[in-house]
Image: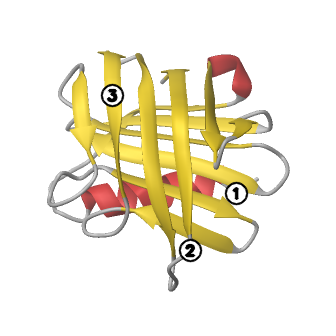
Amino acid sequence: MRHPTLIAALLFGLTACGGDKTPTGTTTGLAHGSMSAKINGAAWSASAGLSAVFSSPNIVAVAGSDGAGRTLGFGLVATGPGTYAVGGLSGTNATYSEGSISYSAALNVGSGSVVVTSLSSTAAAGTFSFTVVQTGGTATKTITEGSFNVKF
């Protein structure tokens, strides 16, 4: 499964701005939550693996894989329930991969948002949608109707 690498990449991107980011919780395994979405209109779910991390200060990263070589994840700095948009200096980003082909939404590439409906030091839930752009290319994938409910 590729999701631990994805989580590390998400956290690196979020923590590159500086500061001490000591993890306060990490969860791996399907017993600790769920994640699903539509990718270009086709149903997808984290059926093979799911990872969730909550790090100080307020960094949330969630990633899942489906066992068919497709991995989806996002990271954000969340202070509580609310809408967190991708872009600018928001710290919110998303990644999607199909085998060796990677796509992302961050800073000035792609677009989207994560809506956090609940957040605590032990769990997070919400929805998400993104348009991710192929790394080194122009192809896009549209991720809609995303939802997550994870425990840290």
Query: Observer-nearest residue: 14 or 115?
Result: 115
CB under 8 Å between callouts 1 and 3? Answer: no
Instruction: Please rate how many residues cluster around mark 1, counting C-alpha atoms within 10 Å: few if below 14, some from 14 to 19, many from 20.
Output: some
Indicate whether 55 appears above or below 75. Answer: above
- What is the C-alpha distance between the residues marked 1 and 2? 22 Å
- What is the C-alpha distance between the residues marked 1 and 3? 25 Å
Q: Tell us which disc is closer to us: 1 or 3.
A: 3
Q: Is residue 25 left or right of residue 121?
A: right
Q: Is residue 133 left or right of residue 50?
A: left
Location of residue 3 in the rendering, given as x and y in whole percent from the top left corner: 64, 51
Give the secondary structure at mark 3: strand
- What is the C-alpha distance between the residues marked 2 and 3? 25 Å
Indicate whether 145 appears above or below 134. Answer: above
Instruction: Please rate how many residues cluster around mark 3, counting C-alpha atoms within 10 Å: few if below 14, some from 14 to 19, many from 20.
Output: some
Q: Residue furthest right?
A: 68
Q: In which quadrant of the rendered view does residue 113 lie?
A: top left
Q: Amino acid at mark 3?
A: Val
Q: Earlier in the sequence, mark 1 or mark 3?
A: 1
Q: Earlier in the sequence, mark 1 or mark 2?
A: 1
Q: Which residue is mark 2?
A: 139
Q: Which residue is mark 1?
A: 2
Q: Residue furthest front?
A: 41
Q: Which residue is mark 3?
A: 115
Location of residue 127 in the rendering, given as x and y in whole percent from the top left corner: 44, 26
Q: Is residue 60 left or right of residue 89?
A: right
Q: Tell us which disc is closer to us: 1 or 2.
A: 2
The structure residue drawn at horizontal position 64% and vertical position 62%, both measured from the top left corner, is: 97
